[in-house]
Image (cartoon, rainbow, N blue to C red):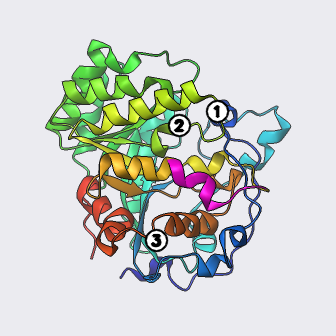
Amino acid sequence: MNPVFSALPDDQAAMMSSRRTFLTRSAAAGFSALTAAGGSAAHTMSANDDRPIIDTHQHLWDLDRFVLPWISPTRPDHAPLRHNYLIPEYRRHSRGLGIVNTVYMEVNVRADQQRAEADFATELCGRRDSGVAGAVIGGSPHLREFAHDIQPLAERNAVKGVRMVLHDPDRPAGLCLQPTFVDNMRRLGDLDLSFDLCMRPDELRDGARLAARCPNTRFILDHCGNWPVRSGDPDRQQRWKDGIRAAADQPNMYIKISGIIASVDKDHWTPDDLAPGVDFCLDAFGPDRCLFGGDWPVCLLGASLKDWVHALKRIVRTRSQEFQQKLFHDNAVAVYRLNVG
């Protein structure tokens, strides 16, 4: 076990009040306390609590170095986001969780800073004390020059994949099915790189179509397909379910159980509120195609990283030990091609 994330300093509560507008609109239902579902957080966890965890969705940002356009400089509710979140902070927040390695996830920097962010991420991977075992870097696969730009980055062992957030306002529906985008996705497959799909739930069928057109590329659907947890609209929930099923029908598509905690009302939620969406994703994709992601520090919009891990362990507690091992650790190694001991 990698000792980097064991015996960490005391957790210090972090406060964040907003995610991107997209996630704010799809905020989830409440959490009053883990005890509402029976017992303390420590008693709601699965039996094998010492299982090593790989967090496949770790955000880190240095605002002295990068511009994150999605963080508004004028909105008061974005003030908590305008801080640096780096390895020391992550260590405090992940203390005692058994997280042995992480995958750095791009943070949607300004487009002209994507190469600098890739340098930042691979530098972290090169530090033995960081615990970062691989990086998913930002890119612009809707542009023709992407094919040229990705080549030298793909030669870095630390780079495991690419992501472009598809639900930003300037990224229209159907963008991922444009010919240039599809060609560049096929190029990623040729380079043995994956692509993380972070998209609107109503567009999940587009993600499935993309995966079908690029059968040699691994796709990871982030945040349970951005399940609209709070939405009481049955039609919207059904569209999400249909999209998840369509995505799961593609053998080269995986799903990341992450992100939905950022949408909850942090004062009124329980693990049972999240269980229907999580279980639907786990059942649709099966034990070999689901991965855990912390989505820190964005998760803090709804709950601490610890509460998210404990909640997910409670949700999956009745599943086999093999299923849980794959979800929290083994599938991360396979999908992101991690070299971990």
Give the answer, above or below, for where 212 lies relative to 262. above
For label 2, the crowd category at 10 Å Cα-Cα, with few meaning under 14, some 14 to 19 and many 20 or more, is many
Viewer-closest of 134 and 311: 311
> How far separated are the C-alphas under marks 1 and 3?
36 Å
Residue tagged 2: 108
Mark 2–mark 1 Cα distance, whole angstroms, equals 8 Å
N-term mark: 2 or 1:
1
Q: SS for tag 2? A: loop
Q: Position of residue 83 (x, y in %)?
A: 72, 52
Q: Is residue 326 magenta?
A: no
Q: Which residue is mark 3?
A: 317
Choose the circle earlier in sequence order: 2 or 3.
Answer: 2
Q: Which range is magenta?
A: 268-276
Q: Amino acid at mark 1?
A: Trp
Which mark's residue is nearer the viewer, 1 or 3?
A: 3
Q: Identify the residue at horizontal 73%, vertical 42% (top origin).
A: 18
Q: Nearer the viewer, residue 122 or 39?
A: 39
Q: Quarter holding the N terminus?
A: bottom left
Circle 1 Cα neighbour tier, 10 Å, few/some/many (<14 / 14–19 / ≥20): some
- Whether residues under marks 2 and 1 lie with C-beta atoms below 8 angstroms apart, the answer is yes
Element type where label 1 sits in the image: loop
Main SS of residues in magenta: helix
Three-letter amino acid code at disc 2? Asn
Q: Is residue 190 left or right of residue 2?
A: left
Nearest to the eye among marks 2 and 3: give it: 3
The answer to whether residue 41 of the structure is visible from this angle is yes
Residue 70: mark in rendering: 1
